[in-house]
Amino acid sequence: MPTLINQRQLLTDQWVHVDDAAELPALVPVLVSLARWQHDRLLLAARQAPLGVLLSTHHTASDIAEHLHSFGLVTIHFPKFTDGRDYSIARTLRERFGYRGELRAAGNVLRDQLFNMARVGFNAFLLRDGQDVDAALAAFRDFSKAYQVSVERPIPLFRRRAAVSA
């Protein structure tokens, strides 16, 4: 079973991924594809349980922007570690569209990417079976400071240092 890191803690995943053709379970949080959500939007909105949407690399943040309030979870699937479009989707959801819910990275999520994934706005990470959980948790402490701005720290290091010195 995959391991979930949420807010830098190990948690049990409460969300049930429902395939496009599968029946929706009652009263449990469900994660559906963007295509399923677009097709069954009214049915899904009427449910009395949390709703999450799964985005792929070919989607954009704009695809769900006007309906972000509907989602308790947005999962972005990384098909391979060399594709950076998912980072852009995450940052756009946080900074441009103001999404404050759970933003989860899934798929090809590697230990050495976790620190930077958190910087662009991911707060949850679904690790694959067999990944070293302790090493993944340690990844968030790889660097004590970052010079660049991020979703976590919108003020660059030189400005933070200047404020302390003043």
Image (cartoon, rainbow, N blue to C red):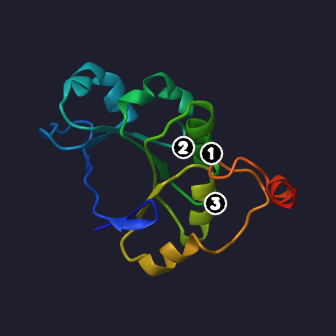
Q: Residue at x 33, y 29 (%)?
A: 37
Q: Circle 2 — which element?
A: loop
Query: Quick check: 48 left or right of 125?
Result: left
Q: How many marks?
A: 3
Q: Are marks 2 and 1 in contact (CB under 8 Å)?
A: yes
Amino acid type, residue under disc 2 in the picture: Thr
Q: Are marks 3 and 2 in contact (CB under 8 Å)?
A: no
In this rendering, which labeled residue sits more in front, label 1 or label 3? 3
Amino acid type, residue under disc 1 in the picture: Arg
Q: Position of residue 49 (x, y in %)?
A: 21, 36
Q: Earlier in the sequence, mark 3 or mark 2?
A: 2
Q: Position of residue 72 (x, y in %)?
A: 36, 39
Q: Is residue 66 above or below residue 145?
A: above
Q: Is residue 121 above or below residue 93?
A: below
Measure how far apart labels 3 and 2 are at the Cα level: 17 Å
Query: Quick check: 116 left or right of 67?
Result: right
In this rendering, which labeled residue sits more in front, label 3 or label 2? 3
| Residue under numbered circle 2 | 57
| Residue under numbered circle 3 | 116
Along the line of sight, the residue nearer the viewer: 150 or 79: 150
